[in-house]
């Protein structure tokens, strides 16, 4: 590979000839061959947005001449197109402040900006008024807020609306309820799906609340939170610039010391993602159970057949989308545990697990966003109800006798349920023999569709 010599404060270093980055990036590449997983592109673009906003702020506040300011902004917009994504190879498991990634972006932007005919340096110009210690926490909040707003929330709304549509279609379907995986009182399918919809609604509410803390930024705190080397008004100007770029409402945090030393908002968001993962796991597992069979399981629904399910059993089809969703949910729960540990790593004035927080947070958002759309489009929207399989066990469900508790008492009802179950007979037939209630009254009291409406049977 052809190389060139680059220099930084530690001396000379060989860098690939075609690379846009310089010596500090190359040192990080050499020092951290850990996971071979670079920082997420969304995070790199967030850092780039900060550099663009900082260049405009520095230019407005008089610290940066217009030629350099415009060159840096042009370079940043070029990076945001995605054309240079391969220029950011530094491993997630790097220095805990994320300094290597900050300098990687600084070096790439300086190279691109210098092609405009003006000398631009990574530290003095691109990084003016900034520190890795406030840029990286700001980028965590910025990238996560954008991802929640543009990707996750719309995906959850789509899944919720898809569920609501199917629930409306299936409001006439009555099925056996189950508690402890055992037969329980009947309910309608729209009620069952409505529970999923409610869970998603509440998850969306929690994300909307978490966004308020995410939109409070560390930028302006510089090295330790005092704002040293940042001009007056810089924090406010950068927040305003980022708001204009994204359409979100960013403000400086009320304490830069808290922003640099803690990751409380990120930990909160990760906790909400873990909660969402539990919702996804619940929906996925319900779908798997309802689809089980087709002959020896519940067989209540038939999920869309998407691919062969076995390399040895011809004709077997598996619930692949719910299985994928459950795995994604498990991964998010695990990533949250790592973020929780990272959130505790704020030693004095700086948290030193910032790259891990950024990577895990964005990975979790991506997993849940993609999973929500897959569940909506490949499972919820397309499953078929096997009403024949629902009706027969519903008529024989011994738990229907619960409706007679207020008429004949719990013990008498329990005896009827036991006899009906052991004899394999419908509850109504046994109840007609064992009580003085007539057939017409029993049909009214034991009507499964009426029982789904709640209240005291009459």
Image (tube, rainbow, N blue to C red):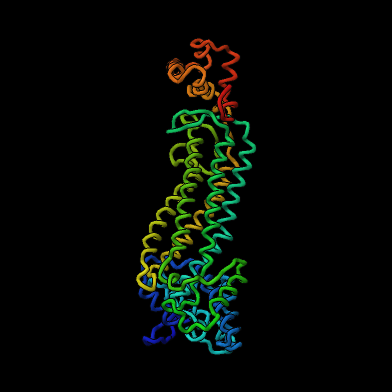
- Residue 67 rendering spot, x and y as whole percentages: 60, 88
- Residue 297 rendering spot, x and y as whole percentages: 47, 31
Residue 94 in view (yes/no): no
Residue at screen point 48% across, 35% down: 292
67 lies left or right of 135: right
368 lies left or right of 243: left
Residue at screen point 39% across, 63% down: 343
Q: Which of the 4 quarters of the picture holds residue 418?
A: top left
278 lies left or right of 146: left
- Residue 275 rendering spot, x and y as whole percentages: 46, 51
Does 160 sit above or below residue 189? below
Does 190 sit above or below residue 158? above
Between 6 and 365, the residue placed more toward the observer is: 365
Name the quadrant of the N terminus: bottom left
Circle count? 0
Residue at screen point 45% across, 83% down: 228
Does 133 sit above or below residue 156? below
């Amino acid at each position: 590979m052809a190389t060139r010599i680059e220099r930084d404060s530690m001396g000379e270093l060989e860098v690939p000839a075609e690379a846009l980055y310089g010596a500090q990036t190359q040192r990080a590449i050499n020092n951290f061959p850990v996971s071979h997983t670079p920082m997420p592109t969304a995070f790199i673009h967030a850092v780039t947005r900060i550099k663009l906003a900082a260049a405009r702020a520095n230019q407005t506040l008089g610290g940066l001449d217009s030629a350099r300011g415009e060159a840096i902004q042009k370079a940043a917009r070029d990076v945001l197109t995605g054309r240079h994504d391969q220029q950011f190879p530094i491993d997630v498991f790097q220095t805990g402040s994320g300094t290597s990634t900050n300098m990687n972006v600084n070096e790439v932007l300086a190279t691109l900006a210098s092609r405009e005919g003006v000398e631009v340096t990574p530290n003095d110009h691109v990084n003016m008024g900034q520190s890795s210690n406030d840029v990286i926490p700001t980028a965590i909040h910025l990238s996560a807020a954008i991802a929640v707003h543009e990707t996750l929330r719309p995906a959850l709304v789509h899944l919720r609306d898809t569920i609501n549509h199917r629930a409306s279609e299936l409001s006439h379907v009555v099925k056996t309820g189950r508690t402890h995986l055992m037969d329980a009182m009947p309910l309608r399918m729209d009620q069952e799906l409505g529970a999923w919809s409610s869970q998603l609604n509440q998850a969306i509410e929690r994300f909307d609340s978490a966004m308020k803390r995410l939109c409070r930024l560390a930028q302006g705190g510089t090295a330790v939170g005092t704002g040293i080397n940042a001009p007056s008004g810089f924090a406010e100007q950068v927040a305003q610039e980022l708001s204009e770029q994204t359409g979100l409402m960013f403000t400086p945090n009320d304490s830069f010391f808290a922003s640099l030393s803690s990751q409380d908002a990120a930990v909160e968001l990760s906790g909400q993602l873990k909660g969402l993962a539990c919702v996804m796991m619940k929906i996925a597992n319900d779908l798997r159970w309802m689809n089980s069979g087709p002959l020896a399981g519940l067989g209540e629904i038939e999920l869309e057949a998407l691919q062969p399910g076995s390399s040895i059993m011809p004709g077997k089809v598996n619930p692949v989308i719910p299985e994928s969703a459950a795995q994604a949910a498990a991964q998010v729960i695990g990533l949250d545990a790592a973020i929780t540990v990272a959130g505790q790593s704020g030693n004095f004035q700086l948290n030193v697990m910032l790259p891990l927080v950024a990577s895990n947070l964005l990975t979790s958002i991506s997993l849940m966003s993609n999973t929500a759309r897959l569940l909506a489009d490949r499972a919820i929207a397309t499953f078929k109800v096997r009403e024949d399989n629902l009706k027969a066990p519903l008529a024989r469900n011994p738990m229907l006798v619960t409706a007679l508790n207020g008429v004949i008492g719990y013990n008498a009802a329990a005896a009827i349920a036991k006899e009906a179950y052991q004899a394999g007979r419908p509850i109504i037939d046994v109840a007609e023999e064992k009580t003085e209630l007539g057939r017409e009254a029993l049909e009214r009291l034991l009507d499964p569709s009426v029982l789904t409406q709640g209240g005291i049977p009459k």
